[in-house]
Amino acid sequence: RHPMRSQHRSRQRGIRTDRPGRQALITAGVDIGSLTAKAVVLQAPALTTAGRSIMPTGSLPAEAAERVLDAALEKAGLTRGDIDALVATGYGRIAVEQADWRITEISCHARGARHLLPGVRTVIDLGGQDAKVISLDDDGRPLDFEMNDRCAAGTGRFFELMSVALNVTLPEFGDIALQAQSPAPISNTCTVFAESEVIGLLAEGRSVAEIAAGLCESVARRVLQLANRLHVREPVVFCGGVAYNRGVLAALRRVMGMEVVVPEQPQLVGALGAALLAVERSQ
């Protein structure tokens, strides 16, 4: 098992919580993933979301962080000068120079999930290029986690490539999978080999729906392998961009034999957790 990775704190700006004429603490969380950048702006103490934004990360994570934060602030009717504290997370968190703290996505996803579903004990995060399963204690703190970060299997990138192979759009992939009577057998979760297998199944006459369902099933079983290394308990929260895929959600519920809950905006869970941790560290 992995030890909990250390949380890096950057040089802290002077956090201003006593500005004249304003009672609310304003914090922001920025989650710079491999494919998408996310930002959430919170107002404390009510912890209401004032603004949020999602956009592609691109090749320059530092610029993506600035763009996505500015977009969230614009929706909130605020400026950078209004932010009292900022936490950065995700693989590109080191690139966020203005961050007061840089905290691992393990801690941020756990905190965001606990806010959305009090009592959550397991978090499944399938992002752009990695997959994580996190177990939480009774207080919602991370106990342990398993991560698949050296293979694209089960990630957003995996489904991008598979949707091209099946000639369907990414948003409709999961709905098509749910139309299958039975999933086609997919023996490989490796992206390269799975693509070859998909081409072979199409040549054999298997339907697109059956193959899509088989791919969702293979990903769910891959996640189950990670989960089986931990002490997984309900409630289970499923977040990350892949959580929009209803075929994967149905397959996860089936292979895990548990209820799996998807938040309204699953891609924002890490950024939300970062903003919440910014509140807690500022008080």
Image (cartoon, rainbow, N blue to C red):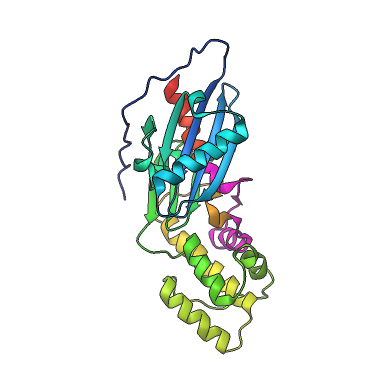
- Residue drawn at x 50%, y 28% as measured from the top left: 27
State the quadrant of the C terminus: top left
Viewer-proximal residue among 217 and 67:
67
**For the image shown, how many numbered marks are present on the structure?**
0
**Is residue 199 shown to the viewer in this render?**
yes
Is 227 a magenta residue? Answer: no
Q: Which residue sits at x=58%, y=11%?
A: 21
Residue at the spot 56% in from the left edge and 89% down from the top edge: 203
213, above or below 146, in the image: below
Residue occupying the far bottom of the picture: 204
Tell me, yes or no, if residue 187 can be seen here: no
Q: Main secondary structure of the magenta part?
A: helix
In this picture, which residue range is highlighted in magenta?
A: 244-270
Horizontal side of 195 relative to 163 (left or right) equals left
Q: Residue at x 39, y 33 (%)?
A: 99
Q: Position of residue 75 (x, y in %)?
A: 62, 35
Which residue is nearer to you in this view: 135 or 23? 23
Residue 249 percent coordinates (x, y): 59, 58
Q: Position of residue 196 (x, y in %)?
A: 46, 81
Q: Is residue 214 above or below residue 11?
A: below
41 vs 207: above or below: above
Query: In this rendering, would 281 be left or right of 173?
Result: left
Q: Residue furthest top?
A: 20
Residue nearer the viewer, 66 or 38? 66
Spot occupied by residue 133 in the image (x, y as percentages of width and height):
44, 51
